[in-house]
Every structure is written in C-alpha cells, then in structure tokens.
Image (spheres, rainbow, N blue to C red):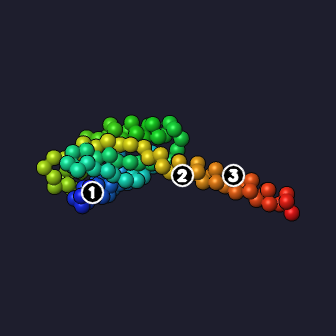
Amino acid sequence: MKHKRCDKVAETIRETVSAILSRGLNDPRIGFVTIIAVEVTVDLRLAKIFFTVIGDDLAKKNTEAGLNSAKGHIRRDLGKVLSLRFLPEIVFCYDHSQEYGNRIDTILREIDKEHDGDDTEHR
C-alpha cells in the first residue's frame, strides 16, 4: 500500500536532487544527469534515486561513481529541505528503462520494415 507521505517525500527528494545537480557539483566525473524517479520505503529510511546520463558506458560508470562520492553533500542539502526525524539513506541506481524502450522501438521498426517489404513483393 502506497502512502501519500512517501510520494510527497520522494517528489521533494527528486526536485531537490535535480536542483543540486543543475547547480553543479565539483566532480568532473558527473555528466549531464537527469533524475527520473525516486522510490522511498514506507519507513522513509531509504530512497532509491533513479537517474540517466547522456553518454556511453564509461560516462554512466563515472557519473554513478561521482554521484556516490557526493552522497554526503547531497544528503546534507536534503536535510535542509526535508523536515524528517531521520534523513533517508540514498542509493543511486542507473535507470535502464530508456535504453530498453529504445531497443524495443528499434525491433518494432525492423519488423515494420520487413512487413512492408513483404507487402511490396506480393503485389
């Protein structure tokens, strides 16, 4: 069962972390990052922050390492915004759903091209 408070805290974390990243961190490993979603446990002790980054696998790994090293700074800034008894631990997770969606889209386009090719051969 979802709680409205969890959703509100997750949205506040998403907005705050996005703002922190848009201002920039002093870590050259962090590329152009987009925060996709945040999932918070019911007890508000853990927040999974899902992100994407533009670039290749190396850029993804470097950005994840940079974000993980900046956790303390990000949590401190979150503490200024969130009025909670316990500040949630944060975990950064790369969101593969966009890549997965792009792959499915490519496969569907290939199938559509093959199907169009079959129609022209039968005419």
- Front in this rendered view, residue 31 or 123: 123
In the image, taking residue 14 as reference, residue 86 lies left or right, namely left
Residue depth check, mark 2 versus mark 1: number of the one nearer the observer? 1
Give me the C-alpha separation between circle 1 and circle 3.
39 Å
Give me the C-alpha separation between circle 2 and circle 3.
14 Å
The percent position of residue 38, horizontal first and vertical second, equals 33, 52
The percent position of residue 109, horizontal first and vertical second, equals 66, 55
In the image, taking residue 119 as reference, residue 99 lies left or right, namely left
Q: Residue beneath label 3, please?
A: 110
Give me the C-alpha separation between circle 2 and circle 1.
26 Å
State which quarter of the image contains the C terminus: bottom right
Residue 11 circle label:
none
The answer to which quarter of the image holds residue 1 is bottom left
Helix, strand or loop at label 2? It is helix
- Front in this rendered view, residue 70 or 47: 47
Question: Mark 2–mark 3 contact, CB under 8 Å?
Answer: no
Q: Residue beneath label 1, please?
A: 2
Residue 50 in sight in this render: yes
Q: Is 27 located above or below residue 3 in the figure?
A: above
Helix, strand or loop at label 3? It is helix
Residue located farthest toward the bottom when viewing the structure as drawn: 123
Helix, strand or loop at label 1? It is loop
Q: Amino acid at mark 2?
A: Gly
Q: Residue at x 32, y 37 (%)?
A: 69
Q: Which mark is first along the chain, 3 or 1? A: 1
Q: Amino acid at mark 3?
A: Glu
Q: Residue at x 36, y 51 (%)?
A: 21
Q: Amino acid at mark 1?
A: Lys
Q: Residue beneath label 2, please?
A: 101
The answer to which quarter of the image holds residue 92 is top left
